[in-house]
Image (tube, rainbow, N blue to C red):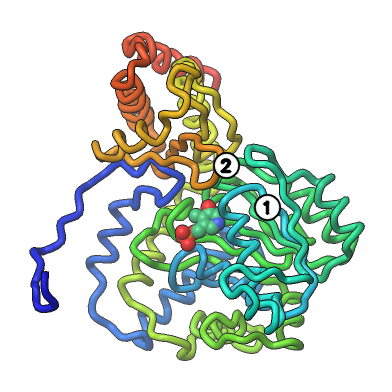
Amino acid sequence: MTNSTIFPQLEIPETIAAGPGPGNTDPRVLQRFASAGVADHMQPDVLRGMVECKYMLRDIMGTSNVHTFGVAGTGWSGLDVMFSAVMPGDKVVMFVNGTFSGIDGLTVRMKAATAEELAADPLDPKAASVIIVDVPHGESVSGEIVEAALAVHKPKWAAMAHWETGSGRVNDIRGFSDACQRHDVMGLVDAVSSLGVEDFRIDDFPGVQGWASCPQKGICCLPLTYAPVSFTDRYIETLRQTGCRTFVHNPILEARHWGIVDGQDVDKGTYHRTHSAYAVAAFHEALRITLQHTVAQRAKDYAFHEAALRDAVTAMGCKVTSNMTSLVVLNLPDSLAGREMELVQNCRSAGFGIWPTLSAPVQVRIGILNLLTPAAISDIVTRFATAMNELGAEIDLGDICDRLDRHYKTALAAE
Ligand SMILES: *Cc1c(COP(=O)(O)O)cnc(C)c1O
């Protein structure tokens, strides 16, 4: 291989994205992505699309926060914008119960570290002003845990993942918001895996001042588009007073391109960076699909199909330890314990994209993002049972399929 090699055209196969994310992008989204004309970032329809996205996002997030918009990039991009208001020396309490909230904790330590603390350990700074409250993998962050920590530490900020995708656990957002209000702490929430999956309105949680999500999970808009964020007036006021050390990820400046100027909606955005007409068109369609389906119906559909998948893998002898509705996190039966990675690798090499956990203990994660039909769940169940049998599990596939059929019949009759 030399520098001048021209490689063959890149072919990427169609796989079943049955992991924690990304979800299966809707064909309507890809169609809009591919049909947008070449237009620059100040062309009127591109700007109008962004303004329309802003209003649709407010609807989906359930908020009247003016500062609600999309951040170009992935979930971490939106989180970086949200955490940009955390300044060196700020006191922050972080609740960590898995891989993703762990990385949120690292982000916050990087932001809150003093120059000396950052230089002492640049990639993993130990910021004295950040208190990390560790909750064991597989457990949820409860309102009591939040209350106890905020009562003792009385920080400026507190942060938590709404749904911790690493362990598949739902954290107590009501308890978090209430405790933040009681102790006058500004709450920040990583809602990357709950937005578009769970039915909730962010304005119902007044202790939370900042929210960040992602394009690729509940919103089903992978073609690198926009991470939804929303900030209360209090967050923006705090930011106005302290400033923050980023131009591109400054929530006040970034909002301008979405037609949010001086805390007001304006009809037309002003330049912040070169947005892509393709990305805007795709994101716009993903938001339209979410609103057409409705957040409430989507949440019901996730709960309905997760219950079917959970029942089937439990019947195969697996033990489910998660309580998210877009994802099942499980331990294999004792006879296959320790072979999780081998099983996941076998599935992945057959185009069945399930995942292991990314931090200890090793478990298997099977997701159903945008796979909300009995046929899709049945395909997942069959593939997973077959992969277990290849490792010697001796599952009766006919029995499992009959059971899944019966589950759906009973569940549909009960509706
Ligand atoms: C997926 C995920 C992230 C990271 O999102 P990216 O799109 O990979 O940047 C952060 N937090 C949580 C809770 C997640 O589930």
Circle 2 sits in a helix, a strand or a loop, which is it?
Answer: loop
In the rendered image, which quarter is residue 224 located in? bottom left
Residue behind label 1 places its C-beta within 8 angstroms of ligand 1: no
Q: Residue at x 65, y 71 (%)?
A: 125
Q: Residue at x 59, y 71 (%)?
A: 68
Which residue is the extreme one toward the front? 120
Q: Quadrant of the N terminus?
A: bottom left
Q: Badge 1 is on which residue?
A: 96
- Which circle's residue, 1 or 2, is located before the other in the chain? 1
Q: Position of residue 169 (x, y in %)?
A: 62, 41
Q: Amino acid at mark 1?
A: Val
Q: Residue at x 54, y 85 (%)?
A: 256
Q: Amino acid at mark 2?
A: Ser
Which one is in front, 359 or 386?
Answer: 359
Q: Quadrant of the C terminus?
A: top right
Q: Position of residue 126 (x, y in %)?
A: 70, 68
Q: Is residue 291 visible?
A: no
Task: Kindly identify which numbered label has been placed on residue 76.
Answer: none
Q: Height in image: 11 above or below 108? A: above
Q: Position of residue 156 (x, y in %)?
A: 81, 71
Circle 1 sits in a helix, a strand or a loop, which is it?
Answer: strand
Position of residue 26 in the picture relative to residue 229 (left or right): left
Which one is in front, 332 or 262?
Answer: 332
Asked whether the beta carbons under mark 1 and mark 2 sit within 8 Å of each other, the answer is no
Q: Badge 2 is on which residue?
A: 167
